[in-house]
Image (spheres, rainbow, N blue to C red):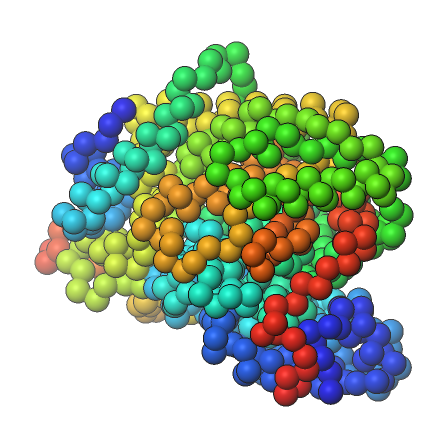
Amino acid sequence: MIDLSVLSATEIRDGIAGKRFSAREVADAAFARVEALEPSIHAFNQLTPELAEAAADRVDAMVAAGDELPPLAGVPAAIKDNMNLVGTRTTCSSKILASYESVYDCTAVRRLLDAGALPVGKCNLDEFAFGSSTENSAFGVTHNPWDTDRVPGGSSGGSAAAVAAGMATVSLGSDTGGSIRQPGALTGTVAMKPTYGRVSRYGCVAFASSLDQIGPFAHNVRDAALVLNAIAGKDEMDATSVTETVPDFTATLNDGVKGLRVGIVRDMLELEGLDPGIKASVEAAAARYAALGAEVGDVDIPAARHGLSAYYIIGPAEASSNLARFDGIRYGYRVDDATDVLDLYMRSRAEGFGPESIRRIMLGTYALSAGYYDAYYGQAQKARTLIIEDFAKAFESYDVLLTPTSPEVAFKIGEKSTDPLAMYLSDVFTIPLNLAGLPGVSMPCGLSEGLPIGLQVIGRHFDEATMLRAAAALEADLALDMTPSMARGGLDG
Amino acid sequence: MAISESDVRHVALLARLALTDGQVSSLQTELNSILGHIDELQGLDLADVQPTAHALEVTNSMRPDVVKPCLSRELALRNAPEAEGGAFVIPAMAGAGEDV
């Protein structure tokens, strides 16, 4: 019996290479877990057993031929349903794309599968990634494996829940304001947004092009680093992907934190509304860093307090432009009784988009409209500069920075769904990184009333290696068991 | 800067969204509430600050100007609600009923 709740990506690959089990058996174990757990989680919009089995057969053929296996050979992987993969629909959890068939592959997905991963399915999200709870999905809410009455966070809630429940060993999400890291925190997974430009965005349906970045969910830091190894690097299909050298992100994970300068972002810890249990847990993590030999101190990022405001101009402004493509003509939902082209656009879009998408499109269109551009968009872009400068200053004195990932643990389904502003506050600690283009990883650092707490470790631009080394050191020191009780054991696999 | 009902209707037209009266009314409330928070930015003195459109310093990304294979017409039309003769079909743009 293969117990996917305990095996790391490397253990799966090595187990297949060592002929202790086959990739096909791993695929079967993954889908047995899906069968047992998915009805109470709803992490997936679409399952892809045929694709997974074909990928597993390719891995098993390599084993039979005596070939060296790629780093993620046979590793079950889930993909957020805003990334294209031929042979699947890419719905963005929207009615407007409900039947959209992928006609090409997203680069990050292609690279993950080229590294040998087995695609389990496409994961639920807040429609077009607009949200922090996965409740804004046209196809139903995703439940948190730690407590199915609670949200998994969002927008990549399906990708987070799939990994937390062990239905996938790793997954891909996208992060525009916290959409990887916040659900990572709420589900007790390791969840990383790389530096802007580190990973190609080609084939990921655009939300806010200057903020979006694809990244991994995993059970541990090493698996997240392995996924980043696979997906990072220049792609000529995305002009904003960078030529920066891609190191082996696993190479320095065990180097420890002796002498590393770790800054606690003090003014963020003083934020009103921060759960005291989370604050205490982040302070305790900082104390562990000191005990491990790091030089720990306090730093402020005062401009970050404007992050939420700047984000709710820049994000919707870019989204309103990007979502203009959904016009009922080239793809997507279309009313069938339009009298002319304007009527076709206006009713197809109004009927196809859900409430939060309409809200963001309206907000963004307003912010960009004549007479308001300078007051809103221009001012937000300037505030963005201040945030970048404050982080740059902090990184003169520190190598990594610490904040909570989310101001609270997983909340109840329905608790915030009627109050957009309360929902937006979920991302107060994660948004500043998107605005500054910085990498951040959320890792579990404890529990509050039985629910996971996320610590956000922030690195310099393109220094994910140091950020991941710091995360790995704390992970080894804390040695937490972050398997929710429903996901324990081998199940039927 | 409070948003009026006619502002909402104007923006909805710009955004090509046929909203119901109920949606116009609730969006007016919600947008005013959200902008009420965002308005804190108006109080900042940012006259000497340069705006940021891209968080990282990047230079032009160039590649050789050569023709390469791309999405076929068949695939490009795969998801079209209506296609005919290798083209997307749309309702009449103007002059419906005339010979065009």
Observer-nearest residue: B65 or A170?
A170
Give how far across and how far down residue A459 sits, in percent. Answer: 72, 39
* Left or right of A92 in this view: A448: right
Compare residues B91 and A63 and report the one nearer the observer: A63
Q: In percent of the image, x 46 and y 55: which residue is there?
A: A411
Q: In the rendered image, which quarter is residue A107 located in?
A: bottom right
Frontmost residue, A197 versus A359? A359
Q: Is residue A116 left or right of residue A266?
A: right
Quarter occupied by the C terminus of chain A: bottom right
Q: Which residue sits at x=86%, y=49%? A: A252
Q: Residue at x 59, y 28 (%)?
A: A267
| Snapshot quadrant of residue A391 | top right
At a point 38% along the width and 51% down the height, the residue shown is A416
Residue B5 visible in image: yes
Vertical relation: A333 (above or below) A179: below
Task: Judge whether A401 appears above or below A144 on screen.
Answer: above
* Residue A265 locus on image (x, y percent): 65, 32
Name above or below for residue B19 compared with residue A144: above
Query: Residue A431: x percent and y percent?
Result: 54, 39
Q: How many marks?
A: 0
